[in-house]
């Protein structure tokens, strides 16, 4: 290809391509400005903080549920043992 032809086509279609790129960026929420970039970074930081808080909350809840399970398992074991003793005494 002739370099002058390439430059000519770039001049002719380059501005249209840039316009399409910028409009598509706005449509899909990707704006090439520093202010928007910092806004996006802050938004993701907030999301990560929220996710970490939720993770900690779920971990605490999970621990509480595990403790409740251990207690109910121990109570069920004792109740089963007591029932077995009563049934054993009743059969004798």
Image (cartoon, rainbow, N blue to C red):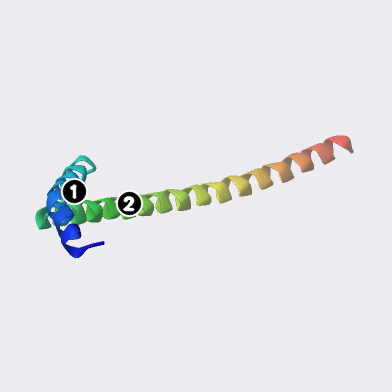
Q: Position of residue 15 (x, y in %)?
A: 12, 50
Residue, x 57% and y 51% (percent of image)?
A: 70
Q: Residue at x 15, y 52 (%)?
A: 14
Residue 67 spot, x, y in % from top left: 51, 51
**In what quadrant of the picture does the C terminus appear?**
top right
Residue designated by label 2: 51
Q: Residue at x 21, y 48 (%)?
A: 30
In terms of depth relative to the viewer, which is nearer, 55 or 28?
Answer: 28
Most extreme residue toward the right is: 92
Q: Quadrant of residue 42?
A: bottom left
Q: Which mark is residue 17?
A: 1
Q: Secondary structure at mark 1?
A: helix
Q: Is residue 22 left or right of residue 1?
A: left
Q: Where residue 36 sits: x, y (%)?
A: 13, 52
Q: Residues within 10 Å of mark 1 (few under 14, many from 20)?
A: few
Numbered marks: total:
2
In this rendering, the label closer to the viewer, 1 or 2: 1
Residue 29: quarter of image: top left
Return the disc, 1 or 2, that comes first in the chain's sequence.
1
Left/right of residue 51 with respect to residue 61 in the rendered view = left
Residue density around tag 2, few if under 14, some if 14–19, many if 20 or more, within 10 Å: few
Q: Residue furthest top?
A: 90
């Amino acid at each position: 290809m002739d370099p002058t032809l390439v430059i000519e086509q770039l001049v002719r279609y380059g501005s249209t391509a840039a316009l399409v790129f910028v409009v598509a960026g706005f449509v899909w929420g990707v704006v090439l400005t520093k202010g928007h970039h910092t806004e996006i970074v802050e938004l993701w930081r907030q999301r990560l903080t929220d996710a970490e808080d939720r993770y900690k909350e779920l971990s605490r809840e999970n621990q509480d549920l595990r403790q409740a399970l251990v207690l109910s398992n121990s109570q069920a074991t004792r109740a089963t043992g007591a029932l077995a003793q009563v049934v054993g005494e009743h059969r004798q």
